[in-house]
Image (cartoon, helix red, strand yellow):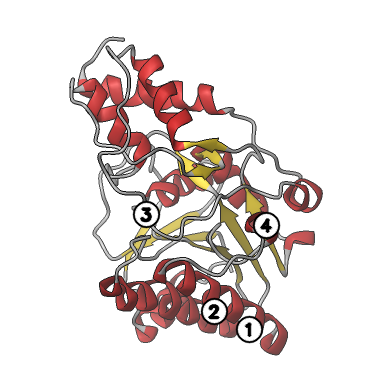
Amino acid sequence: MSGSLVTGATGFIGSHLLRRLGASGEAHGVSRSPQPDIPGMQGVVWHQADLRDAGAVEELFAAVRPEVVHHLAGEVDGARDVGVVLPTLTGNLTSTVNVLAAAARSGSRVVLAGSSEEPRPGNGHAAPPSPYAMAKAAASGYADLFHRLWGVPYTIVRPTMVYGPGQRDEAKLVPYVTLSLLRGEEPRLTSGAKVADWVYVDDVVEAFAAAGAGGRAVGHAFDVGTGVRASVRDVVELLYRIVGADGGPRFGAVADRPLDVPQSAETGPARELLGWEARVGLEEGLRRTVAWYAARQGVIL
């Protein structure tokens, strides 16, 4: 067995993680898409497969024989819409069960990307508020089952609200507001009341890397965040100040999403068992993010 395998390797966190792992050893990436032109991926071995297909997953594991699998592939859609139930079920639960089954046969360790909207201490064990969160919670249950029945070593990393350079989904709050302001447009905003724990992508990548090292992390689920809450209003106002946008944000043009629960990380377990803690504060992380998008828009701040 050799190296690491990152699923969802074209995604926001996955691409950052694959670059990080490839710089320090053998790394394989897999996605449903062909290999993209992502800077810094020299030496990475690319594979194309649909992880919803159990046979394709078995073939992938036979070809790679990974020591550690970082499973980040999935359907990332937090909408409260019945139309996302099936895509999130197959994209997040079926694919995870296929990965766990292949790992049971290959002896690989598995690091799963969980969700901060799963029931956990940081949200008062609130019920999953979306089909996405429900599928993630079920996937965590299956990981524990595979561990208890067949000895699959797993760790679950549950990032809170991740942001940073290279976030491809420009509908997410930070890239949406940033790009709107850089283009001289006024973003359409909710009330801004939602509260979350915002964590910079480089910090999240280091948490996944630490979880993949095994040891005391096996069999545990960890929150990965700063432990500090900030509202959407706080984040948007910071972005306005960093960009130097005229005027101020106008909140309330878009309805708030139902069943949102304030999120924050319980940072103690990750610190104790992974030796990990977030290092980049919110303002510094937003400044780095704005600078990245500004450079690609040709905007001088």
Q: Residue 215's spot in the image, x, y percent?
A: 77, 60
Disc 2 target residue: 100
CA separation in Å, label 1 and label 2: 7 Å
Is 87 displayed left or right of 215 in the figure? Answer: left
Which of the two discs, 3 and 1, labels the residue nearer the N terminus?
1
Which of the two discs, 4 and 1, labels the residue nearer the N terminus?
1
Which of the two discs, 4 and 3, labels the residue nearer the N terminus?
4
Residue 166 visible, this orientation? no
Q: Secondary structure at mark 2?
A: helix
Q: Quadrant of the C terminus?
A: top left
Look at the picture and state if 38 lies above or below 145: above
Q: Residue 36's spot in the image, x, y percent?
A: 26, 49
Q: Residue at x 55, y 50 (%)?
A: 262
Which of the two discs, 4 and 2, labels the residue nearer the N terminus?
2
Residue 108 visible, this orientation? yes
Disc 3 target residue: 257
Residue 146: mark = 1
Disc 4 target residue: 222
Q: Residue 190's spot in the image, x, y percent?
A: 33, 41
